[in-house]
Image (tube, helix red, strand yellow):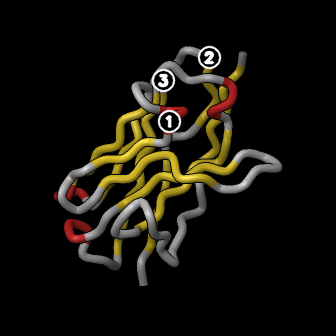
């Protein structure tokens, strides 16, 4: 069974930065694509960024140029570096193991709260 544990969320002022981490176990991490999703109150969960097993990346338009997804296969960990944060980035952020940005895996972590104050 795949286990995903997110960390790194918190409260930050607009314009600030945070780095989220997602530690994965129960899967051959280096062969797995990984995505970061977020869900704001009253809104649907959306894909924010994805990285394939080969390192190709995808970003939703609203975060392009501000967020960077990366992975460390030696540590079975995927990261989301978030900069120039805006209040509209406030959400619970989740990681998900999926081969491409067009798919969603069955396993989710508990999520980590990101709150951006204006």
Q: Residue at x 49, y 48 (%)?
A: 7
How far is disc 2 from disc 3 in space, using C-alphas? 9 Å
Give the mark nearer the N terminus: 2 vs 1: 2
SS at circle 3: loop
**Which tag is nearer the camera, tag 2 or tag 1?**
1
Placement of the N terminus among the 4 image quadrants: bottom left
Nearer the observer, 66 or 110: 66
Question: Which residue in the structure is indicated by mark 1?
Answer: 61
The 10 Å Cα crowd at callout 3, few under 14, some 14 to 19, many 20 or more, is: some
SS at circle 1: helix
Question: Which residue in the structure is indicated by mark 3?
Answer: 17
Nearer the observer, 102 or 3: 102
Q: Is residue 9 left or right of residue 43?
A: left
**Residue 93 position in % (x across, y down):** 58, 49
Q: Is residue 33 left or right of residue 22?
A: left
Question: Which residue in the structure is indicated by mark 2?
Answer: 14
């Amino acid at each position: 069974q795949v286990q995903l544990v997110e960390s790194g969320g918190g409260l930050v002022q607009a314009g600030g930065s945070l780095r989220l981490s997602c530690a994965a176990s129960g899967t051959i991490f280096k062969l797995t694509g990984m995505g970061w999703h977020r869900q704001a109150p009253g809104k649907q969960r959306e894909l924010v960024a994805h990285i394939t097993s080969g390192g190709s990346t995808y970003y939703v338009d609203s975060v392009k140029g501000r967020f960077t997804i990366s992975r460390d296969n030696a540590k079975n960990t995927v990261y989301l570096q978030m900069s120039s944060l805006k209040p509209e980035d406030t959400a619970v952020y989740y990681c998900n193991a999926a081969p491409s940005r067009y798919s969603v895996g069955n396993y989710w972590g508990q999520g980590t709260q990101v709150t951006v104050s204006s």
